[in-house]
Image (spheres, grey):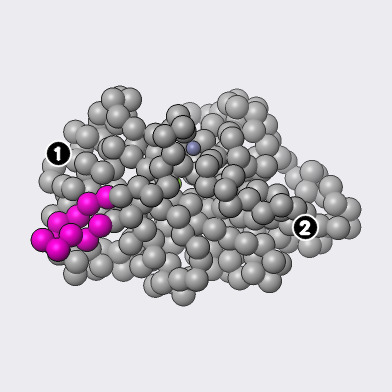
Amino acid sequence: MRTRSQVFCDFDGTISRRDVTDTLLEAFALPEWRLIEAQWRAGEMGSRECMRRQVELLRCSRKELDGLLDAVAIDPGFPDFVAACREAGFPVIVLSDGLDYAIHRVLRNNGLDNLPVYANRLRLRPDGGYGLDSPHADPACPSENGTCKCALMRQLARPGFEAVLVGDGASDFCAASEAADFVLAKQSLLAHCCENALPHAPYTTFRDVKKLLIDLERDASVPDERASIPLMTGYPHHG
Ligand SMILES: [Mg+2]
Ligand SMILES: [Zn+2]
């Protein structure tokens, strides 16, 4: 008997190597975007409000936008991980507090345009400007994200599947705490899981994720085999 996983993947910094929204802002936004970023870091606004205001500062043509997106690199192990999940019957869903347009384009460039994506909606305005809608925000979520991943994970959960979250940062905190059965974590999400004693394992690349979720499960002669690898809760986090 194997554990069947429903895999919820963050996009920015998890599937993509760099944060695509930050890359876009650095390249094309009016300089005020950094001020707004600082206000968000200081807790003066939620991430939804912050991103909406920043996206309105973008000044680039569609061609420039697409050109930058076409240079975005993803974790090289991700396509192989998705293929292995498909073979194992594990659904893979992308949950992102980033921009749907960017995600769809990057996934399509990598032959992965069939993955379901839940993210903020980048509005391409007829005057050439940009706006942001957040169809998956949840006013009840304390994270104030544009995309509330905890609400989405609960909504999309399949009975009989273990809800696994793969992520790297603050946009994953509410889902890790409230909705995931198990978390694969790096960067600040790893610290969050440690501090809150959430069931998790650290990873660096999707090659590790595949090993943890699929290869070990497949090779397991006993269902609890995965417990023999170092799953960590509550070890002190290193900066
Ligand atoms: Mg991220
Ligand atoms: Zn939430």
Give the answer, above or below, for where 194 lies relative to 105: above
Q: Is residue 125 magenta?
A: yes
Ranked by sequence position, the earlier of labels 2 and 1 is: 1
Instruction: Say whether residue 139 is left or right of residue 217.
Output: left
Q: Position of residue 207 (x, y in %)?
A: 60, 59
Give the answer, above or below, for where 233 lies relative to 152: above
Q: Is residue 4 magenta?
A: no
Identify the residue position indicated by label 2 in the image.
Answer: 217
Secondary structure state at the residue bearing disc 2: helix
Q: Which residues are magenta?
A: 123-132
Q: Amino acid at mark 2?
A: Glu
- Comparing 65 with 147, the one in front is 147
Disc 2/disc 1 C-alpha distance (Å): 49 Å
Look at 22% across and 61% down and name the residue there. 124
Q: Is residue 228 visible?
A: yes
Badge 2, how many Cα within 10 Å: few under 14, some, many 20+? many
Look at 60% across and 40% down and name the residue there. 179
Q: Position of residue 229 (x, y in %)?
A: 75, 45
Instruction: Say whether residue 47 is left or right of residue 55.
Output: right
Q: Quadrant of the N terminus?
A: bottom right
Look at 33% across and 62% down and name the residue there. 101
Give the answer, above or below, for where 98 lies relative to 210: above
Label 2–label 1 contact, CB within 8 A:
no
Instruction: Say whether residue 156 is left or right of residue 100.
Output: right
- The image quarter in which residue 38 lies: top left
Badge 1, how many Cα within 10 Å: few under 14, some, many 20+? few
Any atom of ligand 1 within 8 Å of the CB at mark 2? no
- Comparing 230 with 34, the one in front is 34
Identify the residue position indicated by label 1 in the image.
Answer: 32
Q: Position of residue 7 (x, y in %)?
A: 61, 55
Secondary structure state at the residue bearing disc 1: loop
Q: Position of residue 216 (x, y in %)?
A: 76, 57
